[in-house]
Amino acid sequence: MQISSRLSARAGIERASIVMATAANLDLLFEAGLLEKPVESSPSDIIVALAGDKGAIDAAIGEVEAALVQRAADRRHEAGVPEIACRTIEAALAEQSGANLALISVPGDYAAAEAFKALRLGLNVMLFSDNVSIADEIALKQLAHEHQLMVMGPDCGTAIIDGVPLGFANAVRRGEIGVVAASGTGLQQVACLIDRWGAGVSQAIGTGGRDLKAEVGGRTMLQGLTALAADTATKVIVLISKPPAANMARRVLAQATKSGKPVVVCFLGADPSVLHGSGIHPAPTLDAAARIAIDLSQGCNGRAIPATPNDGDNVAIAAEVAHLEPGQRFVRGVYSGGTFCYEALLLLSAALGPIMSSTPLDRSCVLADPWRSEGHTVVDLGDDIFTRGRPHPMIDNTLRAERIVTEVRDPAVAVVLFDLVLGYGAHRDPAAEIGAAVEAARAVAARDGRYVVFVASVCGTTGDPQGLAGQEARLRHAGVLLADSNAEAVRLAARIAQQRIAKESGLQAKRGQQ
Amino acid sequence: MKPFFGGNLGIINIGLASFAEAIADAGVAVVSIDWRPPGLGDIAAGRALAELVRLPIVEAANEEAIARYRRSQPVLAGVGAAGKTLPGMGERMILHAGPPIEWERMCGPMRGAIAGAILLEGWAANLDAALALAATGEITFSPCHHHDAVGPMAGVISPSMPVWIVADRAYGTLAFSNMNEGLGKVLRFGANGAEVIERLTWMGSVLGPALSATIETAGGIELKPLMAQALHMGDELHNRNVAATSLLIRRLLPPAIKVLRNPDDLAKVFAFVASNDHFFLNISMAACKAMVNAARGVEASSLVTAMARNGVDFGIRLSGTGDDWFTAPAPKVDGLYFPGYGNADAALDLGDSCITETAGLGGFAMAAAPAIVQFVGGTPQDATAYSNEMTHIVMGRNDALTLPGLNHTGTPAGIDARKVVDSGIAPVINTGIAHRQAGVGQIGAGITRAPMVAFCKAIRALAARVGDEARARGAGSRA
């Protein structure tokens, strides 16, 4: 993945994909147009698929070969006979008998088998891989239950265990707040905000997005709750998910109540009235979850601190809005994080009415063409529809950079809203590339005599490899209006759009504020 | 649930290597696996394997099987005529190498050897008649392995041929192999001319009886100590047997001088043995057959008890799957050729001789035989690397057969089909290369790998068998 990202950044290369030649990956390459005809390959081969001009492709192939040779050389570097590395979990366990967790990120077709082996060998599992069937997920969680082990995932992108970032995770200060999340970026957001606002995380457990489905039975979330309830280092627990089915929600809340610890429940988009019970603290947004959890961990009642617009924001908004032309009124959200996109859809539709998307809240709002925005639009470029045959936008900024420029060509666009996710596994310097895209987009708009507002939040910490301060500084330099959290960024964007709409038509403005 | 946090976190990383960096940066112990799809991408076999990993019934069966293998005490006991010695040997039966195969599908060298055996037995007057007879179906063809025997290359054994008898003193069982004819125009490469038949006749009438009497006088020859010594002298006992052959002569000569009254026979017998660096190979094979036979028939065990090729199919058997063969197309051999020959002349992998690898010798013991790389290709480092690599797919080591170059550790032994599929590491085999046409002989030697497909089939079968048994037992306990 890192090599594909490096290659697609090369001049003359339009697309680059380096994947294992599994049947599923070959299909994806076909669909992405990176493969024209079947190639003779076995799943343990690596396929390098490139689109671009001839010279650039030759140079890129040279780079790949050099990287592979280097890798082989690294393995043989010691004189004498090369010892071969462990090929199996069982062999690795013989080398490190104290291991207790397997982090599995192999292609989906093979992931369940690796997880079954890990469980049989007595290891807990974090299953980063996706494309694992729900039947396998159920069987894995059943086996884990029998062996008194835990399976985080499948499709568990992130977790923080004993302060160790696993998968796509951030370097978060240790503290007293434990998190169990069915959403990867949801977990990252809450953990990073806890860090940003001065508190810390004891454990952050990912469950995978399907854990709370009735068939799976919320096994991992319930286990996580139990583990955090028993963990003396955890004072406050945060649960993050999309709203589960009613009976599932009841089970989780009942278990939460039994924990004897305050539990902040952020079921994004859920009716807050169902989230009640002794010790249950509902949070409507991810940032609210972080604020309430911090408040509770400091011994307060957890009811305070609704995010209110401050004077600084008001001044900034007024300054930005003053630059906009008549007719500029739409918000365009260009996201890399699925849960950020979802949160934006929830907040914007409450403020502005129906929001178009390739993954909308309501089917009537699905984009006819996911590559073309209409009206207020928010897209998750990390969704399968966009990532087929391409690296994820948290790793490779190309697609987002293009989409940002595309959005400003529409004269009706007032605000471009986006996220930037830092941490291990993410792109090494996303602000440089996205900042440059913002500058390029400004130039495009300026040629047409327009100004466009850019609003964003950076999800990361000071300890992350990219460094939060430097990334934010780069975006500010590009004139991006920054908020601490995604929810705040969305509110800023919504207020800008509302002010524009109010200017144009008092009637419409009234409707928008209702 | 046992909490896995708040204590000592230890992580095994399977997949993206970059994830390990973040973990190591945080100061936590992490081992990254050099992962590749199990069974070279056979998803069903990978799933079947996952059911067998650390399964108590399989673990217990394997412990039993490897212990039995280790206890085996092969002793060279004598020489007998195949027809009178081999269990289940019929009057009009010819044995061959590898898994079962019909005449129509046999490769050139095997057909040539069978025709030669028919001539030796006097069942046909000439070569054409012999080939015609073979095609009629009047003669039964049967794998050596079905008669506790093994034979290199074509592995052809007919009733009048002399066979080595190896007795397992620990179990009171017997294993057999034919006798080595030397290089050049020989039956095992499909040659069947007059000189071949003459030599075989002499081996049956003079060599076999003479050596049998000699061995009897010696009171049998313990094979494990002799083989252990040969490993320390640079043999790996598959493709290099020069030390073992020399050691054998030292053991044979004193009793031979005592018992062989005819000085002509004595001279001819020892000239024949001394002229062939590979003379010991067939004894090594019979000893190996005895050792893995000891491990046979342990229900649910994934220990490999046979690897054998007939020049068309490569077959394996597991201890825990009864008499079933699991086959795949025989691979090509990657090797060095004698002058004048090349890839296009080569037959596919052939012979029962990889019984040595099955028992932990040959390619598994290559670290003992750095000189062999001049014969099979590669560097002395490669030879050691092969032995190291094989430790990843075995159940343990054979401490009676040690490798000085690896600090006197035992040879990796007891191939676990689960580990083969899981790691994607196929057993390495040192082997000779036959000409694809009958009678030309050996044209080179090299290294090949047992085909993964056969192991995938075996693992699927074992998982089904173990699953059936578990279900049957479950049903029984409910009843």
Image (spheres, rainbow, N blue to C red):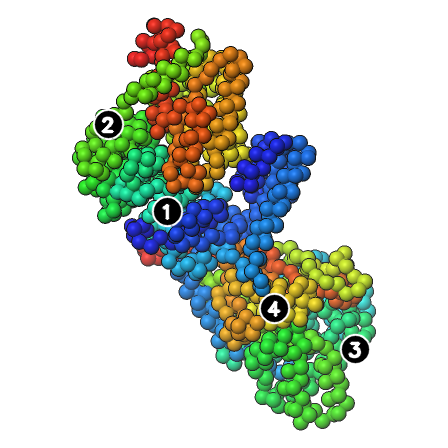
- Quick one: SS at disc 3? helix
Q: Position of residue B470 (x, y in %)?
A: 40, 56
What is the number of the mark on residue A150?
none
Q: Please state which amino acid type lies under the numbered disc 4.
A: Met
Residues at marks 2 and 3, CA–CA distance in whole angstroms: 103 Å
Which chain is indicated by disc 4? B
Tag 4 and tag 3, C-beta contact below 8 Å: no
Which chain is indicated by disc 3? B
Q: Which residue is mark 1?
A: A164
Tag 2 and tag 1, C-beta contact below 8 Å: no
Q: Earlier in the sequence, mark 2 or mark 1?
A: 1
Residues at marks 4 and 3, CA–CA distance in whole angstroms: 36 Å
Quadrant where the C terminus of chain A is found in the figure: top left
Q: Which residue is mark 3?
A: B198
Q: Which residue is mark 4?
A: B366
Q: Nearer the viewer, residue B433 or B264?
A: B433
